[in-house]
Image (tube, rainbow, N blue to C red):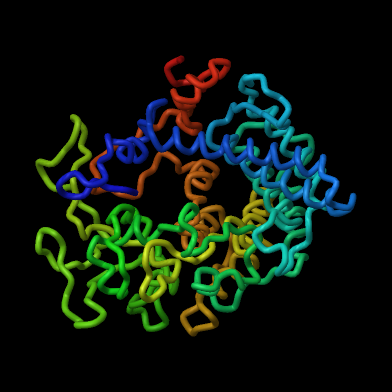
Amino acid sequence: VTPTRIGGDWYDGGQFREFYMHSWTAQTNTLKDSWSAASSAIGTCNATIDRLENSTLLSDAEKKQAVASIRGVRAFWIYVMMDNWGNIPLVTSYQDKELPSVKPRQEVFNWLIQEVNEIANNCPEASSDTYGKFTQGAAYTLLAKLLLNAEAWKVTYSGNAYQDCVAACEKVMGMGYILEPNWKTNFSLNNNTSREAIFAICFSDQDTENQNQMMNRTLHYADNLSENANYAAWNGICAQPEYVKLFINNFQDSDNTNKNSDPRLHKTFRIGERRNITTNEMLFTGQNNPLIYSVDVKIIDGTERDGTPWGDVVQEAGARCQKWDYAPGLTNAMGNHFHIFRLADVYLMKAEALLRSGNAGEATGLVNEVRKRAYENSADYQPISTATLENVLLERRLELAWEGWSRQDDIRFGVFEKGMWPDSNCNRKTDEYLKIYPISQDAWQTNQNIVQNPGYPSF
């Protein structure tokens, strides 16, 4: 969540309040930017495919593989748009210059299933040379995502979606990826070496345009002094309190003190006091409070905004992102890569699909493999006795925090309307139509063949 910090930082017209309260509109800036970014990426893929197909510089085999890989990237972005907006334009040719209308989610889903199946085996195999490209592993992971979410999207599939999801996951699991023995390898400064990564965004701290700026978005303005880093962060996003408490409340250590809870807790969240790395002096906020990141995030009485319960919180409120390592002396951007797909997710998708097909036995083993790796064989490792949808969702929360799957998981597991920040005093809207976003006003002004999604005011 991105709360409003005392004095109004991060209020930004209320767009983050809208996201938490599910009160977004066609004017919400983040939705406008997300639609534009995805549409632009699809257009770039179409242009690239057109150039590759007409290239005389590649052999037929090279061309076939390159085109398949870019078609995979295009399919990924179309999947992102379909997941978020449901009914979307489906533009698959660079030569098609007509303004498109929107296609029903069912039609887009059908196209994606056919497209991914068609390209999967023509994509490159995973290797150090193809890291960051859309490979066969990425194709089958995307196929598994499509099949696992089909029921939640209310689309029909010609086969058994859960059984075919299991088969797609097994394809990926047989391709040589491994669960890295050290969980943190996936988030280290050199996480391009991870053998768990299936599809990755490759960032560089030298890239001035495409940057991983997680540290700026989450850390307090003064926290650079704890890292000997030459930047002032923006003090934005933090974790919803009840999400963090999932790591604390659900497990006990072998001596029953609950001192450590899930071992991923402090590898995922930055909690507690921050000190100057050079002098060891306590850091302070702009209100002269000690910089001690709290798990709880409480609204300051009397700061409510725009006639809603949403108000300001103190600068130090909220657990911050600690999942990706921060480089000593970090300047403006992180060089860690972001793994869109990784093998632990595939294990948990397979477990879920098995459960939804009535096979709890094999699902239990898969969840425990992910859990055991997280504990690194310590005495405090606690396997689950029987997999259930509840503990699969919990394991997804623990394993995949900050990785962008919570919204999709919430919808699929039927908890989309339940926030995890009780002290916000903000009730979420729960109407069914909110499970897809409104198409932005800007998108319609560019293309008036677009029709707004059901439940939202027409353009």
In the displayed structure, 286 sits above or below 72; it is below
Q: Residue at x 22, y 47 (%)?
A: 9
Residue at point 19% right, 82% down?
279
Q: Nearer the viewer, residue 352 or 358?
A: 352
Q: For residue 361, say whether it is visible.
A: no
Name the side, left or right, on which 130 lies relative to 200: right
Most extreme residue toward the right is: 60
Looking at the picture, does residue 10 appear above or below residue 440?
A: below
Horizontal arrangement in the rendering, residue 92 relative to residue 267 (left or right): right
Residue placed farthest to the front in the image? 57
Q: Is residue 26 above or below residue 334?
A: above
Q: Is residue 109 left or right of residue 39?
A: right
Q: Does residue 12 appear left or right of residue 345 in this picture?
A: left
Specify the quadrant that holds the C terminus.
top left
Residue 217 appears at what percent x and percent y?
35, 55
Quarter of the image holding residue 402? bottom left
Residue situated in front as seen by the camera: 136 or 356: 136
Q: Residue 12 in the image: state x and y as whole percent.
A: 28, 39
Residue 105 picture quarter: top right
The x and y percentages for residue 394 are: 48, 58
- Identity of the residue drawn at 60% across and 28% down: 88
Residue at the spot x=49%, y=66% of the render?
335
In this view, the residue in front, 295 or 25, is 25
Q: Position of residue 349 (x, y in %)?
A: 63, 55
